[in-house]
Image: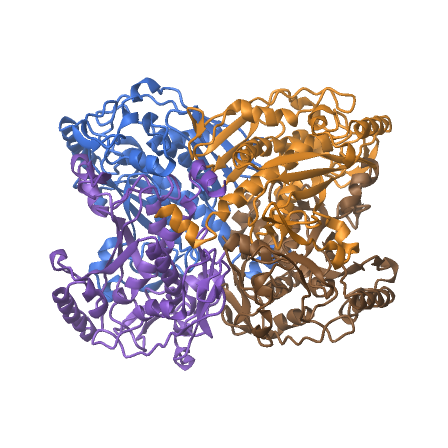
Chain colours: A brown, B orange, C blue, D purple
Amino acid sequence: MAGSTYGTIFKITTWGESHGAGLGVVIDGCPAGIPLSAMDVQQFLDRRKPGQTRIATPRKEADEVEILSGIFEGYTTGTPISMLVRNTSQQSGDYSEIASYYRPGHADFTFDSKYGFRDYRGGGRSSGRETVGRVAAGAVACIALKQLGIELITYTKSIGNITINMDAFDTSAILETPTCMPDREASEKAENYLEQCIKNSDSAGGIIECIVKNMPAGIGDPVFEKLDANLAKAVMSIGAVKAVEVGDGCAVSFSNGSFNNDAFCIEEQKISKKTNHAGGILGGISDGSDIILRAYVKPTPSIYSTQETVNKEKEEIKINIKGRHDPIIVPRAVVVVEAMTAITLFDALLLNMTARMDSIQKFYI
Amino acid sequence: MAGSTYGTIFKITTWGESHGAGLGVVIDGCPAGIPLSAMDVQQFLDRRKPGQTRIATPRKEADEVEILSGIFEGYTTGTPISMLVRNTSQQSGDYSEIASYYRPGHADFTFDSKYGFRDYRGGGRSSGRETVGRVAAGAVACIALKQLGIELITYTKSIGNITINMDAFDTSAILETPTCMPDREASEKAENYLEQCIKNSDSAGGIIECIVKNMPAGIGDPVFEKLDANLAKAVMSIGAVKAVEVGDGCAVSFSNGSFNNDAFCIEEQKISKKTNHAGGILGGISDGSDIILRAYVKPTPSIYSTQETVNKEKEEIKINIKGRHDPIIVPRAVVVVEAMTAITLFDALLLNMTARMDSIQKFYI
Amino acid sequence: MAGSTYGTIFKITTWGESHGAGLGVVIDGCPAGIPLSAMDVQQFLDRRKPGQTRIATPRKEADEVEILSGIFEGYTTGTPISMLVRNTSQQSGDYSEIASYYRPGHADFTFDSKYGFRDYRGGGRSSGRETVGRVAAGAVACIALKQLGIELITYTKSIGNITINMDAFDTSAILETPTCMPDREASEKAENYLEQCIKNSDSAGGIIECIVKNMPAGIGDPVFEKLDANLAKAVMSIGAVKAVEVGDGCAVSFSNGSFNNDAFCIEEQKISKKTNHAGGILGGISDGSDIILRAYVKPTPSIYSTQETVNKEKEEIKINIKGRHDPIIVPRAVVVVEAMTAITLFDALLLNMTARMDSIQKFYI
Amino acid sequence: MAGSTYGTIFKITTWGESHGAGLGVVIDGCPAGIPLSAMDVQQFLDRRKPGQTRIATPRKEADEVEILSGIFEGYTTGTPISMLVRNTSQQSGDYSEIASYYRPGHADFTFDSKYGFRDYRGGGRSSGRETVGRVAAGAVACIALKQLGIELITYTKSIGNITINMDAFDTSAILETPTCMPDREASEKAENYLEQCIKNSDSAGGIIECIVKNMPAGIGDPVFEKLDANLAKAVMSIGAVKAVEVGDGCAVSFSNGSFNNDAFCIEEQKISKKTNHAGGILGGISDGSDIILRAYVKPTPSIYSTQETVNKEKEEIKINIKGRHDPIIVPRAVVVVEAMTAITLFDALLLNMTARMDSIQKFYI
């Protein structure tokens, strides 16, 4: 099991290497009757493209999606949706050197340890381009969630030690700043910091936050398939993410029960909570408050500085990795976090439909 | 799917409520030929029992395990191993009140939202007792890992803001201190802090750390089934865990590539790393260094203080939860983190055996 | 994966050996709110007990079921239902001889080939007693199906070359004849034939038929998870079944399209079919007609005649298997076929609830 | 779950409709290091093409496969293998009529029942073209099996009531006769019979047999994942198959234990069997003899005769289906049976590697 399949009912299978013929995804188990076009998916894919900004390299990735199956007269049919993005701008000539050694912070060594050899061109399957399939599938999940009134807001919360000011939160800025920060002032500072990183031949990390609005209560399962457990897996499975937290997250370890417990209350005749330290999930099941999660992303491992490593002949060497490296992964990973969250939530919503016998009777009789 | 099954090859299914007849687990897919007795499993279960200390309530849980199947003449047979722990000390009389309202920080409300009603006695399926089955299965995984030379060291890293001193690390203290801290001095301080919490009718959180020694390189999968993704799910699925990190974890967001990248080097003619910011996993696959992960555990939600909440009639009320509440979950959850980690790693090791055709040929021809 | 788990949403895990402490099943994913008691399950288990008749040996199996979890105040709670049947009448003393050789027609040799050794007492995991867990789970599925108006009629269709007369079909006879035939005259003949088999130290095979009434149209999936494909697996997974057919089954190979195609028609303003050669399934999806399937069961492999075989030392030997052998498996397997069919159908009904986006919207909004 | 994914380790996901952009498959979990080219796969796909013979219509399907990922320098890399076959010869103009009614023997009605609407062009997802993905994946499984010394021989055993003579078995004839019969004389008769069917505007059914040579003993699992249970599912999941049998199959119901039990013996110092009524599988696990299975295939449901049916407005109507209909499905389904069998067996072989702890220790230490 190479592990390229994810989900139980809404099940996605991604494939493709950085420098192969292309990348794609097959979604199996998507309900019939969702309006869907290639353009809908393209909008999500465009969000993971490198921008033409001072903090990104001038690489051009067209990433045009073709939907090969599962749509008829503008609607999903319930059969597998296969989506294909051809690789266009890759040139394989540059990678002869990388073939011989192991780049620090990359999966080169671990791939060789596992499989005996690897497609070394541009990172192969462990390239960031692997997320193309995730984002295409996430687009479908987001569209389905929207039909249920559920929306995701995902953005860069911090880069290095520059953090957004929640009081200055401006949703429109997410798609407009090169950092995907919802705070234009913080974004400006972060861009300056990243320029400094580029000058230093170095790279930076950051934090991505995702907030889910209007999630109904009662979704998720109580033991291994806890909603937060599945979100943690979904988000940690994105390359470069090294920590995941829900609600107050790490801070709970310093907290006390009297503070951390969210008091229940009645709001508009519905059961609600006065605070949301739990991040919308209690006992693995959604409680109707916003779901809040954060992914901690490591600095781009490809940097221009000289690095120490070893080659396949087990010799210690020094290397300078050529090519185009972004100084940060975070902004392009924002839509990937959103995609993985959406896929996980939609799958949980589908699974939840069989929780009660009275609903099943109502459905069938 | 109630989600009580976990694992792909080494697949466990737990069952049981706090106040039902008992709790247990069925392990399906355990390889034949592992020496195993009820006593081996009992040793792990004893680690999750409440101690007779000043920081735990004097509850008595016998938790004696019976192995019902899958063992013959002292060895696993390859068929399902069913293990049963009867509930003994539970008294159901106390729970009539809890039935009517939703305890803050607990799963009462979310269970009712999902299933329409719940076994409210002692938390039912969402009680901490649910982990009995996990620990019993984890014992088997730990024994199997030990036969492969792999060992797990799991302990309390911090309670509130008292953190162990890694220079004072004393493995023997883990099983001897009531906090499960490997640092007797820090443990003493933490116990004092917890006594203060008890006096305040309050509770505390903390951090559990797990270190895996001698994990071979090449284990895990590159995309959704990344080893760290599965560990994140495994650990986040433990009630009260709100964040999970691997290696430097959250700290990577403040780091730079030049610092965060671990340089490869040669040690004893093997490829190794000079540092281990990655926590033993690169691109989702183990790199042969120690695997390091941390779980952030929230304060016990059951506290003696008066709390605000609502009842099933949607009235805002004030409650005082009676019964025996530990001021902290962390020490009893240490063995649960170890269990979930061991199950995840053993499963990944089994899955990995089919990664290369030459190994398969060697196996069969 | 030892393969003791079955189902996607309604997921069962069976365990237990013929001569271990007991046998059982855990059902995970059973919807909340189904009325269920141990007595309901016991009624199904009693159907697989050996009768006190001239065609069965006077073995006594109590097979009393205990429900250990997942039920509260008479209803399923949505959490795992663990059921336990203790082994009582087994005496292990008889099996020393069987340990050394491979019984023809049994799994002794294949178990040793796979696992290196086996629990040889009474067939261990490959004993017919393994079906206890299936039947207990099947009872729950049958009860759930009944709540949806769906009923299963399962019976012995033939024994040797004695076949029931469909014109003499008498449902009450199924539970009253020792053969489980719905035709008392045919049953009488079959009993005579089986007595003859006993006299010859031989055994006989037969056919089990299952008819499902009131299955709604639209259940099942179009490719690998075809409803008939899953039924074929479910039924073929019962020990001793060597062929499975749906509708006209094998006979279609001799048929012509003009005969085999079932014409659609309108009955009581609903779309129906004039004939049912298809056995209620078209393209892997139920069509609303009765589902009809048959299992072909081999003769009991344990016979009193002298047989040729080999022992573990690879010597050719002659053996006489002692103990109590029924001359036929079929009557006791009838309820097992019903159980596996019910589990498969209920799971398919649950999975089907997510087929259309409009149903999902209606469920959530 | 639309059910287009099959397998546990060697996991395939097919997609595509008869008249969409194309069809394909993603294989996840294929071991690294298998030599593979598009040409290898093309050879299998060519076997499912309609021939240019008197018993097939002169339809032209190019079905050229492109491998999009998972291969590097001529070998599988362990990452997903995505294969694409573009649809070329389809003309959608012909299908306006079919949209309005339900063809007898087809999945039109059941698709509408499940999903609310369907891609009606050429049968959409339930077209025989769906098997393109299965055959492409089966090619890879067959190549892998061959590297383990395992070979499959699959052929038409009978058409209508014309059955091959096993004494005249000629393997070369399988690929040369238009019927895929390994007996040229029987094939000649069958062709005459099929010509007669064409004249009668009718169609015929038949039987496909698959024999697996050199399967090692010990493969498969004892309960739900019995090797024969999985083969039954695999083969029954092929459209038009209505019955599956292993070894003596249906005939066991008329047999006696003394005849049906295969005596073990020693051959060339290995444990073998004197007969093979079991068809190579005992207790769900391979016994080292040839695996023998048969699929019973119904007559092509599309026939030229006038048929009775209903339309979407629930009116009873008479129809004549236009287009190109083969009078028989069997010859083109032979390679599909082989593909599904190979995929199932290879997956079982991979799963089996974790059956014993001593093998696992040997692998890792």
Q: Residue at x 28, y 62 (%)?
A: D334
Whether residue B75 sits left or right of residue D308 in the image: it is: right
Whether residue A46 sits left or right of residue D364 in the image: it is: right
> Which of A131/B327 is in front?
A131
Q: Residue at x 32, y 26 (%)?
A: C122
- Residue C319 spot, x, y in % from top left: 19, 27
Whether residue D349 sits left or right of residue A202 in the image: it is: left
Quarter in which the N terminus of chain B is drawn: top right
Whether residue A90 sits left or right of residue D78 in the image: it is: right
Residue B131 can be seen in this image: yes
Residue C173 can be seen in this image: no
- Residue A133 spot, x, y in % from top left: 58, 65
Q: Is residue A325 above or below residue D10?
A: below
Q: Residue at x 61, y 61 (%)?
A: A141
> Which of B248/B133 is in front?
B248
> Which of C134/A98 is in front?
A98
Q: Is residue B173 above or below residue A80?
A: above
Picture quadrant of residue A130: bottom right
Q: Residue at x 60, y 20 (%)?
A: B88
- Residue D15 spot, x, y in % from top left: 46, 65
